[in-house]
Image: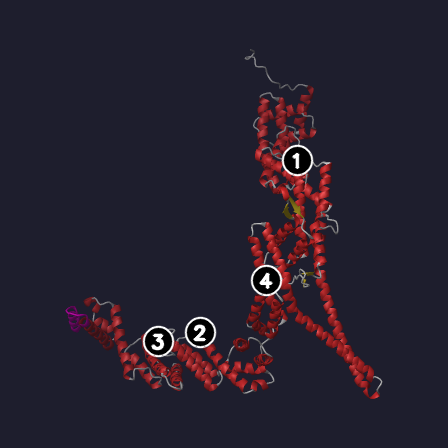
Amino acid sequence: MNLARRFLRERAEAGSRSQDSEQRKALGKLVYVSYLVFGAQQAAFLMPLRRVFNIQPASIDVMRRDNAKQLFDNYIKAHGGELQADQGFLQGLKEYQDRVQLSDEVAEEVMREAARTKLERCLGTALQNVKTRTKKSDYAPAVKALREALDYNNQLERLSQQPNMPKGLARTNVYGGKYKEGDKDLRELFRVFVEESLRSEGRFTEQLEQDVTALQQMLGLGQKEAASLRDELSSKIYRRLLREEVTSGRLDAATSKAAVLQQLCDRLKFNPEAAGALHRSLYRQKMDDILKNHNKITESDAKELDRQRILLCITKAEINTIQRETCGRLFQTAVEDAINAGIDRFSFDDRDRVKTAQKELRIPDSLAKEILDTVARKAFTGFVTRSRSQRDRLEAAKELKKLVFFSNIVVAPLLEDVQGAAAKADAAKKEAAKKEIAELMAKAQADMDKDDKKEDATAAKDKAEDLQKQVDATEKQEAEQKQEAEQKPKDEVEQGKGGEAEGEGQAEGEQPATLKKAQTAAAARKDGEEVGSSGVTMKSQKEINLRNDLQLRDRQDIYRNFLLYCMSGDTVALPMGSTVVVERDESEFARLSQLGEILGLTQLDVATVHKDLAETAFRNQAQQILQTGTLTKENTEYLSGMRDKMGLSKEQAEKIIKGVQNQRLIGGLEAAKNTGSLSLQKVLDMKESGVEIDSFISEEMRLNLYTKEVQAVLSDGTGNFDEERLLQQLPKDLHLPETKVHRAVEEQAKDRKRTTLVQAVSYLRQRKMDDTVKALNNMVACNKALPSDEAVQWREQEELQDLYSVYVGREKDAAKQAVVQKLFSLSDKDAQSLKEVVEAGDFKLEAEDDDTNFF
């Protein structure tokens, strides 16, 4: 305690932080030694530090821990400064830990630091070797140092299973030391270890797999980072092994190339998909080198590429993709040059250059057509964009005409060229097969008479028959495909006609006049038309179109605008300031038909545009005629002539006329709504005229009209309530839901049943007998609308009897009398008694004269 006082006094008198720290450490050593000598309980009793010096227990625990940790760390440093992977050393370390009374958690931390020191020394040796620049890289010392670190970790893990070992003894890593996470040096060490191990062993063994995983954990590398490095190294080694297999000729001689490549992947545990990507990159590199040197593919180049394709097991689809991205790029340039020549400068030289490029680059017809389709559609879109940007309809139509001529003059010949090679090849193949069949049949006929060659003749005949069957099957398939292609548009048209006939009753075969004219013009130019006086025939094409580039609505709008141009004609100026409209010739309607094909419109889509336009024109005429008055005989004949001119059926015309008439009715309806004079009868009249009232009158307004009608019936004083009309027919005509109808009737009847009784009593007291009877009739109507067995409640029963007597005297309908009797809860005896009084003339309840007011 005196020592503690002295340390505290000297600490208080210290003139610097270093002196203060020394005295604090001296006090801590005193506390630690005291607890170590006397034990925790006796030391706490003999040295009341908290009570005398106000030293908290937490501070005492820190002093004990720090001094024990320092002694434990000094023990390790005395034995080399590294945690030795030796059983005797570790057991002695455990005994020393118990002797200095150090907790397992703190001891584990110190041991981890000591083990990390060992690993850092190994890694430092490896890094020094890796970074040493020599003429020939030798990474053997680096790999040796890394394996030493791995063996050290393995020994620690094995020793942790032995008895009397320090707690927390396990593998460790460099994380938390001088190496930071994601350090480039650590990545380089990992790369060197994996690469050199694969180079020496030639395959990914199970032991190497375990070592790589352990090294990844020791270096603190992430899963993705390690996997990326491993794949990169595996790809590098795979490429080297693949080169050895190819250069040695073993891969060429192998029966199954795929099996050899799979063995390489298994040796390196290399992902087959990554290997496939590497194969494609090698093939692409070979293709790029050939095109860079020759700008075309020669026969020898084609054979070498085919050999590489077989060796690397690249599929036909993958070859097509690579060819599209390499050769296709050059071919596309040639096609773009021809397309950019335009209508005026396009020539046979452009066609020859495209055909030459396709031949030299060995572009398949399907790929050539695909590239031409892409480039041509881009050009088509440019024409459409320029047409849309024109404000003048005539200028817009001129751009569309240029589009049609561009398709016929430029695109169609190029399309014919890229497809012609395949057609010629098929024709040559058929001719060769037919020639072979003829030779075999001739040989069989000649050898049939010779006894020694009858077997050869029979074999030749059988072979010829087999070839003939193949040729017949091919021709039959082509004929079926051609018939299907021709029948499809017809089916679309027939389907469209069937739909129109079902919806409108259109007569079979009736078409708008403009559609007939366009079809006639297109049929006349089916085999092409001559371009000027050059002798060159211009044909249209429909395989390359804008079906997938524009929405159907946009394509139909473009077609409709050009159709309007064809129908409007040109305005020609004459002398003296007069003008005349010249009708378009047949060629413009031929361009219209060809434009529909370029836009990718089906015959049904085209027919819809013509039909809509014809109906619009006829509707405008009908509106002008019906605007001034009714449909007279002269107006009917005029519209009939217009119908024939437009090519519309009688049913279509009648429907249009009826629609125009309905529009007039709807106009009157809107006016009535705006002025507030809309009545239920007007709505029902429009309903009978075929107008869909729910489209023009909201449900709320229709329900209000219905409610007003119910109110009128319940207050007209007749006592009649037509249930069939008010609860069934009228809601059906007004398209009102049943639930809302019943709710509206219930609300009106329930509210009025009580109020009508009060009105009846009031009229009775005023001696207004007619009004009393009307009020009671209204109550009867309310009861019919909302039947109820409950009697009405009234305090003066005599007044109810008077009401009944008045009602019986003036209303002779027995059914209504029975309803009033039931509502007033009168027994049959009382009711009969009241009736007898009324019939006998003894009931007198008339209006009294006012004797005070006689002037």
Residue 342, disc: 4
- Quadrant (top left/top right/bottom left/bottom right) for the N terminus: bottom left
Comes first in the chain, label 2 or label 4: 2
Q: Please identify the residue farthest to the bottom as the structure is shown.
A: 452
Q: Nearer the viewer, mark 4 or mark 3?
A: 4
Q: Position of residue 795 (x, y in %)?
A: 56, 28
Decide which of tag 2 and tag 1 comes sooner along the chain.
2
Between discs 4 and 3, the one toward the N terminus: 3
Residue stretch rendered in magenta on the structure: 1-18
Name the residue tied to disc 1: 628
Q: Residues within 10 Å of mark 1 (few under 14, many from 20)?
A: few
Camera-nearest label, 2 or 1: 1
Q: Which of the two marks, 1 or 4, is nearer to us in this view?
A: 4
Q: Nearer the viewer, residue 30 or 781?
A: 781
| Residue 653, horizontal then vertical, whole percent | 70, 44
Q: Is residue 324 left or right of residue 216?
A: right
Residue 221 image-quadrant placement: bottom left
Instruction: Find disc 2 in the rendering and name its residue.
Output: 223
- Disc 3 + disc 2, Cβ < 8 Å: no
Q: Which residue is mark 3?
A: 179
Which of marks 3 and 1 precedes in the sequence? 3
Q: Residue at x 56, y 50 (%)?
A: 391
- Confirm whether the magenta stretch covers residue 97: no
